[in-house]
Each structure stands twice: as structure tokens, then as C-alpha cells.
Image (cartoon, rainbow, N blue to C red):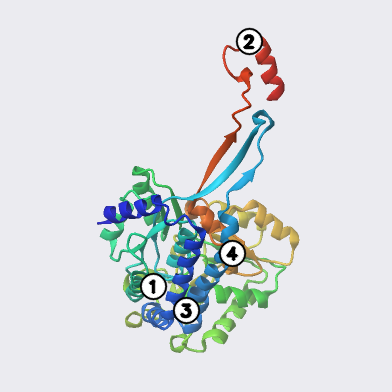
């Protein structure tokens, strides 16, 4: 089935139907109108699957998609133009061009944490670049998956945009199909499987993965501001965000003060009992709930710690006096648990971070420019913020993606268009100019000439 869809989509792209920029813009406009028509359904589905509030559902998913369509539509004609580039003197009489062209049929596999936005955002890039696409929403968020399916099937033909629902078997069948490009967002473990399957068909991939993203809070920081922005970033979507601060590395002189302020912020944001807050979400399913509860060390809980299986609830939790050897530091948390570790030497802290896999995100709170410079220059990470968390991924001017184990490739804004475009290089040469010295036989005179030209 998947192979048939891919073949029909590849034929559709080869027919030239998706080449017109006006056609692409109309499809983006159609997608936006379809989403607007189904806004209420989407908000309800996000509440059912993840207990997202209406504000969070709109701000982090639906509104984000609208902004992406608006920005890309505004700039698409410029990006899609054939670009004249410089030509070396040795090729005098020629002109060089870059032709952006679609790959063909691309596969987009979405995650469960932002199940609408992280499917639509790459899909927008694929459409903008002139591709056809097959979308695979997460089976862990069935209501959103059904909503995405309803939206896309009602508005697009399968030979252009198709949706495949299902679990592991469906995903396995898709990743072993010879698409022209695969875009995957999910765990590092599944990312390895996707990359291995794609390699067998020599299919290029973008992998948006994760990892343990550190948040450094320096002694010279605004502690109140740091607490405010850390708690917001960590517990948005109940901590199920790939770029959420995974753990805090705070200078020992201010650790006590920071923990106290973070506890205050939890109460300020979610009340005395966050389980009753309309603004605090739930864990996606029992398997992930059990995994997260297994990371809790009751002796180190400074705030929260309570949980309820039948509600898939885990309170916003701070764990204090955590060490690098604790279980909570073994893997990406991806939930509402925030470990706090102390440091007294920035150099040692940086070495600890660099001793682990490269993180998807890094955050540093400081007013000290030297500290800022050291962290940004010495630590390799996908992207991040100084004196804030998370918001770097909302800018269409900043590519979003990982490095090393946290991912390969990037997207957002222009980068989305470029990710789903093959940049075809073409050199056009005049027929009236034909340099004889490049052809055999190669005399000593020709050798001297080529040495002068290419030096």
C-alpha cells in the first residue's frame, strides 16, 4: 500500500503539477483554512490526549502553525527563484545557477508530545518546496491522529498528501519504503531504527531527537527571573517537550535560593494542588507514567512528587541534591521532574556536560558576559537561550535541530524550505568559447598555463 502511494506521488511531482509557486501557495492557504475550520476539534483532541489547556493548545500548536504558514507564504516566491551565483575565472564565459527542486515523495513521522504542530510544521516545508507527502501521526495521541486524518483527507488527494495511521507495524512498513526523503521526530532509539532503514534505500533523513538538555544557573544571575522562566519552560506540556530543561546545574552559592523560588513559581502557576489546575497537562499514557514514576527518589524531593496512575498525573516535581549517578540522570526525563545539581567551578560543570552526548538544547542564566561566552563557545548543542528557556524554537529566523545524538538536520522558516529542497547546481557555458588548453595532449606550455590560472 505504502509503495503504491509513493509511486503515485512521485509521478505527480514528475508531472510538474507541484512546480508552480502559485500552486504551492494555494495549498498552504487551503491547509490553513482547513485547520481554522477544525480548530475546535483540534483543541478538544489535545485536551483528550494530553489534557492541554486551550491557551497551550493554541499558543504552542495551532497558532504556531498559522505563523509558520504566514511567514513561509510571505517569502516563498523569493526562496524558490533560481539563484545566479558567482563563477570562477577559470570558467570565464560561463554562468552558474542553483535550482531549488522538490525531492519528490517525503515521509513525515510525528511524535506524541506536540502531535499536531510537529506534524504540520515539516509538512508546511514539504509543500512549500513542491513535494508530495505521507504523514504518519503518533498512535499515542489517537484523538489528534484522527483529527489530522480528517483534515488532510477532506482537503487533499492521496496522490498529493496522504495520511497513514497505526502503530509500530505501520511505521516499520513506511520507513522501509523508498521515499525520497524522511523527516522523523521522536526518541533517539527509534531514530536509530529510522536511519538504519533509510540507509538501506539510500533515503536522506532529518532526525529531530532529544537528550538531556542542561540549564546552567550562574552565581551572577537574576535568580527570580531564572526561576520564573525555568519553571515555565520545564512544566509546559507536563514536561513532555524535547527542548525542556532536563536538569539544573546551579552554582552552590545560590542553589538554596533558586530552589525556594522555583517552588514558589510552581504554586504561583498551578496553585496549591496542580492536579486541579486547568493549565497543567497529563502524561501521554501508562507506560510513560510508570517510566517517570520510576525515576523519582522520594528522599530527594523538594517539591511535588505525588502521582496518580488513573489520572496519568505526576505533579510538577523538583528533586534536590541530585548527583550525576542518580537514576534520574541516566536518560532524558521527558516529564515533569526537574533534578537540581550544584557546581562550584564552571570549567568542571562544562566538562561534565561535554562528557555526555550533545544535547538538543542548552540554557544559561547569567549576567556575566565571560560566563556566557565560555558556555556558548565550549559546549556543542542544537540550540538554546541565554536568560530564557524554549523560546529559540519559536523564531522562523533560527534553524531548529540537533547535533550528534540529539539529531541531524534542521527546519523552521527558510530552513524548512531548504531541508525539503534539493539544491541543483547548473553551469551554463557559451558555445562560442572553447578553451583548447584543457584538452589533451598536455604540453609543458599548457601545464605552465594551468598553474597560472589555478594557483
Residue 47 image point, x, y percent: 40, 81
Q: In the picture provided, is 387 more to the left or to the right than 272?
A: right
Which residue does the numbered mark 2 point to in the structure image? 443
361, 169: nearer the viewer: 169
Mark 1 vs mark 4: which is more N-terminal?
Answer: 1
Kindly report the distance in space between the C-alpha atoms of the residues bearing marks 4 and 3. 19 Å
Which residue does the numbered mark 1 point to in the structure image? 293
Query: Marks 4 and 1: in contact by CB < 8 Å?
Result: no
Q: Which of the image's four quarters has the C terminus?
A: top right
Q: Residues within 10 Å of mark 3 (few under 14, many from 20)?
A: many
Which residue is depicted at the point 59% across and 42% down?
A: 97
Mark 4 vs mark 2: which is more N-terminal?
Answer: 4
Q: Nearer the viewer, mark 2 or mark 3?
A: 2
Q: Nearer the viewer, mark 3 or mark 1?
A: 3
Q: Which mark is residue 57?
A: 3
59, 437: nearer the viewer: 437
Mark 2 vs mark 3: which is more N-terminal?
Answer: 3
Kindly report the distance in space between the C-alpha atoms of the residues bearing marks 4 and 2. 55 Å
Q: Residues within 10 Å of mark 1 (few under 14, many from 20)?
A: some
Mark 2 vs mark 1: which is more N-terminal?
Answer: 1
Query: Marks 1 and 2: in contact by CB < 8 Å?
Result: no
Which residue is depicted at the point 58% across and 56% down?
A: 79
Residue 398 image point, x, y percent: 60, 60
Residue 267 image point, x, y percent: 55, 86
* Secondary-structure class at tag 4: loop
Which residue does the numbered mark 4 point to in the structure image? 396
Kindly report the distance in space between the C-alpha atoms of the residues bearing marks 3 and 1. 25 Å
Q: Residues within 10 Å of mark 2 (few under 14, many from 20)?
A: few
Q: Nearer the viewer, mark 2 or mark 1?
A: 2
310, 79: nearer the viewer: 79
Which residue is depicted at the point 57% across and 59% down?
A: 77
Amino acid at each position: 500500500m505504502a509503495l503504491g502511494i509513493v509511486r503515485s506521488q512521485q509521478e505527480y511531482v514528475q508531472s510538474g503539477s507541484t512546480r508552480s509557486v502559485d500552486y504551492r501557495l494555494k495549498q498552504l492557504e487551503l491547509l490553513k483554512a482547513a485547520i481554522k475550520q477544525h480548530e475546535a476539534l483540534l483543541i478538544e483532541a489535545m485536551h483528550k490526549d494530553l489534557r492541554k489547556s486551550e491557551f497551550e493548545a493554541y499558543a504552542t500548536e495551532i497558532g504556531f502553525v498559522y505563523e509558520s504558514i504566514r511567514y513561509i507564504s510571505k517569502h516563498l516566491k523569493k526562496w524558490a527563484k533560481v539563484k545566479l551565483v558567482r563563477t570562477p575565472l577559470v570558467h570565464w564565459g560561463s554562468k552558474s545557477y542553483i535550482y531549488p527542486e522538490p525531492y519528490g515523495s517525503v515521509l513525515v513521522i510525528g511524535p506524541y508530545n506536540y502531535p499536531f504542530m510537529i506534524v504540520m510544521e515539516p509538512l508546511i516545508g514539504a509543500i512549500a518546496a513542491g513535494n508530495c507527502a505521507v504523514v504518519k501521526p503518533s498512535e499515542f495521541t489517537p484523538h489528534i491522529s484522527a483529527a489530522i486524518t480528517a483534515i488532510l483527507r477532506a482537503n487533499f488527494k492521496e496522490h498529493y498528501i496522504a495520511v497513514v495511521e497505526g502503530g509500530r507495524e505501520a511505521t516499520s512498513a513506511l520507513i522501509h519504503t523508498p521515499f525520497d526523503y524522511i523527516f522523523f521526530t521522536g526518541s533517539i532509539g527509534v531514530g536509530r531504527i529510522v536511519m538504519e532503514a533509510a540507509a538501506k534505500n539510500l533515503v536522506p533523513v532529518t532526525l529531530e531527537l532529544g537528550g538531556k538538555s542542561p540549564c546552567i544557573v550562574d552565581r551572577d544571575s537574576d535568580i527570580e527571573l531564572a526561576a520564573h522562566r525555568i519553571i515555565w519552560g520545564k512544566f509546559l506540556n507536563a514536561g513532555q517537550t524535547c527542548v525542556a530543561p532536563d536538569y539544573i546545574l546551579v552554582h552552590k552559592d545560590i542553589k538554596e535560593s533558586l530552589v525556594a523560588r522555583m517552588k514558589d513559581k510552581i504554586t504561583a502557576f498551578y496553585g496549591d494542588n496542580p492536579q486541579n489546575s486547568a493549565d497543567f497537562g497529563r502524561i501521554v499514557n501508562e507506560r510513560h507514567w510508570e517510566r517517570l514514576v520510576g525515576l523519582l527518589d522520594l528522599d530527594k524531593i523538594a517539591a511535588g512528587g505525588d502521582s496518580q496512575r488513573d489520572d496519568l498525573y505526576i505533579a510538577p516535581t523538583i528533586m534536590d541534591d541530585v548527583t550525576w549517578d542518580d537514576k534520574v540522570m541516566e536518560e532524558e526525563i521527558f516529564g515533569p521532574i526537574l533534578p537540581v545539581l550544584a557546581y562550584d567551578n564552571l570549567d568542571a560543570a562544562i566538562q561534565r556536560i561535554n562528557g555526555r552526548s550533545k544535547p538538543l538544547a542548552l540554557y544559561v542564566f547569567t549576567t556575566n558576559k565571560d560566563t556566557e561566552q565560555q558556555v556558548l563557545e565550549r559546549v556543542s548543542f542544537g540550540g538554546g537561550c541565554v536568560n530564557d528557556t524554549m523560546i529559540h524554537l519559536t523564531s522562523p529566523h533560527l534553524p531548529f535541530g540537533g547535533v550528534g545524538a540529539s539529531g541531524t538536520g534542521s527546519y523552521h522558516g527558510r530552513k524548512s524550505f531548504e531541508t525539503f529542497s534539493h539544491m541543483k547546481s547548473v553551469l551554463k557555458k557559451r558555445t562560442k568559447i572553447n578553451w583548447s588548453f584543457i584538452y589533451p595532449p598536455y604540453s609543458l606550455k599548457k601545464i605552465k598555463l594551468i598553474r597560472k590560472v589555478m594557483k
